Image (cartoon, grey):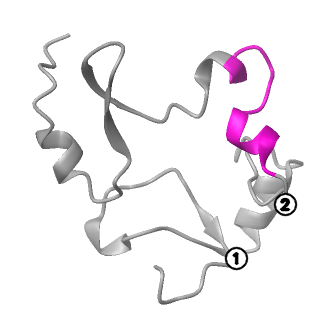
Amino acid sequence: DYCMACGYCVQACPYAARFINPVEHKSDKCTWCYHRVKKGLLPACVTVCPQKARLFGDLNDIDSEVSKLFEADQWMVLKPEMHTDPTCFYIGLPREVV
């Protein structure tokens, strides 16, 4: 890995999703708790959300809740004008946030 923790990518990220990992001293971002998902668990943020406002699932599984919501065309992405092909979708956001 060639990251020297300069922070340029943190500043450049249009979603403010990157940070400098204080343990590994390199740039990092959310991995949707890959270590949990590969064990069949949900990401921690989904598990602990008291309002159940977060959903996580496989868009390719036609029976999943996220797939049904996606097919209902009720989703949006942040900063679509950036053309970054995001994989995080939002449902019910006020238009002024997008």
Amino acid on which disc 2 is placed:
Gln
Q: Dot 2, crowdedness within 10 Å: few (<14), some or many (≥20)? A: few
Camera-nearest residue between 94 and 83: 94
The quarter of the displayed image where residue 20 is located: top left
Name the quarter where the N terminus is drawn. top left
Along the line of sight, the residue nearer the viewer: 66 or 25: 25
> Badge 1 is on which residue?
74
- State left or right for residue 11 relative to residue 49: left
Q: Secondary structure at mark 1?
A: loop
Image quadrant in which you'd find residue 73: bottom right
Does the magenta-highlighted stretch encompass residue 13? no
Residues drawn in magenta = 36-49
Q: Amino acid at mark 1?
A: Gln
Residue at image x 78%, y 50%? 49
Tell me which residue sits at (61%, 79%) in the image.
93
1 or 2: mark nearer the eye? 2
Viewed as shown, does residue 97 lie left or right of 85?
right
Q: Is residue 21 above or below residue 86?
A: above
- Taking 86 as reference, is 77 above or below it? below
Residue at the location (76% across, 14% down)? 39
User: Is residue 65 shown above or below 30?
Assistant: below
The residue at 32%/56% (across/down) is: 84
The tag earlier along the polypeptide, 1 or 2, is 2
Residue 1 left/right relative to 39:
left
Q: Is 47 in the magenta?
A: yes
Q: In the drawing, what numbered circle is on residue 51?
A: 2
Secondary structure beneath dot 2 equals loop
x then y, percent, for residue 97: 48, 81
Q: Is residue 90 left or right of residue 5?
A: right
**Which residue ends up furthest to the front in the rendered image?**
22
